[in-house]
Amino acid sequence: ANHLRLINNNNVNTWHQSADKPKGRLAQSDDTIEFPIAPMAEAEPTELIHLTYEGNFCLECESTVIKIAGADAGADDPNKVEVQIDRTSMHPQGGGQPTDVGIISSTTEGGAKLKVEKVTIDRETGIVTHAGTLINVHGDEEPAATFEVGSKVQVSVDADNRRLLSECHTAGHVVDSAMARCGQNLPPTKGYHFMDGPYVEYRGKIPPEERETLLGNLKASFQDLVQEDIDTTIQNLPKEKAEEVCNNIAQNFDFSDYSSETVRVVSVANFPCPCGGTHVKSTGELKERGWGIKGPIKSKKGVVRIRYGPDCA
């Protein structure tokens, strides 16, 4: 049988659907209620606000609760839940960028409030899940309120954390532009934009005798690009146009694996590439924390790694 758990404030109902009978059972007491069941519609992908240029800087949005799981009385922590909503301003972890964190709160006074600790996306369905802890707004002696399916909520991104992660991701793209400016048009293969040691990797090699000179040139080029205060652009382009734009500098990007007909192209420091992350408005915004390139350059087994971080100007 198929099981769908519906979570209410005070009880948990389990719905059972038989494959051969168009009937349903509500298993909540000794009494059995039968009723016709309509076929369940497939859930729509979550609308990601940050994918447009304007949405990239939008930290709040109103949304509707689609599904909630958890909040079981017998769970280790009954306040740990996972919530799905129809649209979100939070960036789900992926593409080399960590998850956003923040708050989802009911628009009803005294309603539920969730401290969001991790946001993930199912790449096949496009559905985003917000995992976190319900905040008890009524005092420790009362159970924390939870959300009702269909209710309206306000999504609020932690602004300081988003700012830091956006700077980190933008700085990684400045590394790409600095590499191109130094004549190193190597295909980028991986970006790790986490604060515990960000880096960008490329396919190719740098001979040992050239690495020290290249490192100095890269550091200088990175700082030049920051000082030039180049605007960031974000466009959602047809795949053919995206391929043309991104491979204008060098044939660095393979679009054959893209199933979508539209590609989000981010240009940082005049270096366009496909990207789903969040960014700051211009390279000049990397000055305050002193973002820059770190040494040494690593080149091993056909992979070149360039490290970067704050306090490196």
Image (cartoon, grey):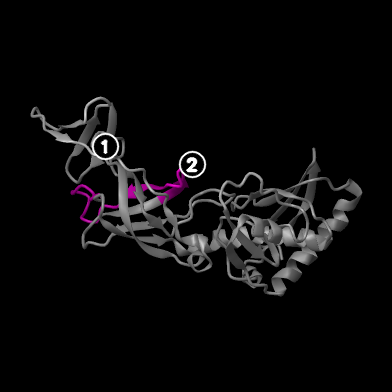
Judging depth in this view, the residue of 178 and 133 nearest the camera is 178
- Return the x and y of residue 91 as percentages of the image width and height: 48, 55
Mark 1 closeness class: few <14, some 14–19, many ≥20 residues within 10 Å: some
Residue at the disc numbered 2: 124
Mark 2 closeness class: few <14, some 14–19, many ≥20 residues within 10 Å: few
Residue at the disc numbered 1: 5
Residue 122 falls left or right of residue 182: left
- Return the x and y of residue 151 as percentages of the image width and height: 25, 55
Residue 205 falls left or right of residue 192: right
SS type, badge 2? loop
For residue 217, which quarter of the picture?
bottom right
Judging depth in this view, the residue of 141 and 201 nearest the camera is 201
For residue 102, which quarter of the picture?
bottom left
Three-letter amino acid code at disc 1? Arg
Q: Residue drawn 56% across and 50% down?
A: 260
Q: Quick check: can you spot residue 35? A: yes
SS type, badge 1? strand
Query: Number of marks in the image?
Result: 2
Please say whether residue 272 is one of the residues in the magenta stretch: no
Three-letter amino acid code at disc 2? Glu
- Return the x and y of residue 220 as percentages of the image width and height: 79, 66
Stretch in magenta: 117-146
Q: Quick check: can you spot residue 292? A: no
- Return the x and y of residue 211 as percentages of the image width and height: 85, 52
Quadrant assignment for the C terminus? bottom right
Please say whether residue 133 is one of the residues in the magenta stretch: yes
CA gap between label 1 and label 2 equals 22 Å
Judging depth in this view, the residue of 108 and 275 nearest the camera is 275
Residue 310 falls left or right of residue 278: right
Residue farthest toward the left in the current orientation of the protein: 31
Quadrant assignment for the N terminus? top left
Q: Residue drawn 65% across and 58% down?
A: 242
